[in-house]
Image (cartoon, rainbow, N blue to C red):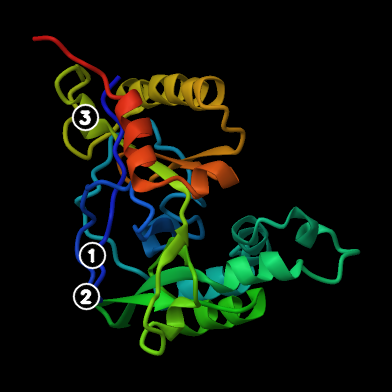
Amino acid sequence: MAPPRSSNDDDEEFEFGDETNASRSSINDNKDVSTSPSEDVSTSPSEDVFSTPPTSQSSSADESVVFSPELLGMYYSRLFPYHFLYSWLAYDPSSLNPGKKGASSSSSRLFAHREFSMTIEPQPGNEVYIRYQSFPSQEELTNAIIKRRPTKIDIGAVFNHPPKDKHAVANLQTVQRELVFDIDLTDYDGVRNCGCEGAKICNKCWKFMGMAVEVMDQGLREDFGFEHVAWFYSGRRGVHCWVCDEQARTLSNEARSAVVSYFEASVSK
């Protein structure tokens, strides 16, 4: 199995370009969760949590994607699962119960201190990446997404203060972050014999992802004792694993690196 990775963004705001692969094991990282539909994929999201597996047809992630403002508006108004997203990131399953009046104060605080970032297109072809967004409630998150219609939404860490107050506080620090792994098919280019390479994928080479998921899932659960392990199609060329246990969310950077190293495969040539 190829070594797992994690991917991270710089701490500055910048115009968002092509996705890059870097380490995502640090508790300080900001990373990602979902994109919304383009004209090419109708009303189905195209990346991470809200995405679908590859089809039997080989595809390339390098093809240009044109986002439709009308479809984005329809998706965010009618289909985007705000309630499930809030329940997950607040870590309050009771919020899904219609009989409950709301999340606990600790869960609401956890959500309000969560960083979101968005990629928006004020003008076609002009992508702007906005960081340090935070929302005290599901309603405010919903209103912001519907208004901005982002082409991509990233989920970041939980801070000791709301990230939107970044310029008003002197000691903004990360306190929690899910343990996230990124496995790409490009790691298997040396052994793929189906004709695919780079970002191209098909049913034959996708089996490598299935095997990687089985190995890592078993190791995370049996060797480390994690219970809340979620796997998502990345939307491009691989899979992302989010370990959501509180124990995982509060790991130090050194401990995260140790978990990553545990799954590294030694290949002798």
Q: Position of residue 34 (x, y in %)?
A: 45, 58
Residue drawn at x 36%, y 87% as measured from the top left = 167
Quadrant in which the C terminus is drawn = top left
Contact? badges 3 and 1 (CB < 8 Å):
no
> Quick one: 10 or 68, which is closer to the camera?
10
Q: Position of residue 163 (x, y in %)?
A: 44, 77
Give SS at disc 1.
loop
Q: Which residue is mark 2?
A: 14
Q: Which residue is mark 3?
A: 187
The mark lying in front, picked from 2 and 1, is: 1
Name which residue type carries label 2.
Phe
Q: Position of residue 27 (x, y in %)?
A: 38, 53
Q: Which residue is mark 1?
A: 10
Q: CA distance from mark 2 to mark 1?
A: 9 Å
Q: Residue furthest left?
A: 269
> Quick one: 132 or 186, which is closer to the camera?
132
Horizontal side of residue 191 vs 168, given as left or right: left
Contact? badges 2 and 1 (CB < 8 Å):
yes
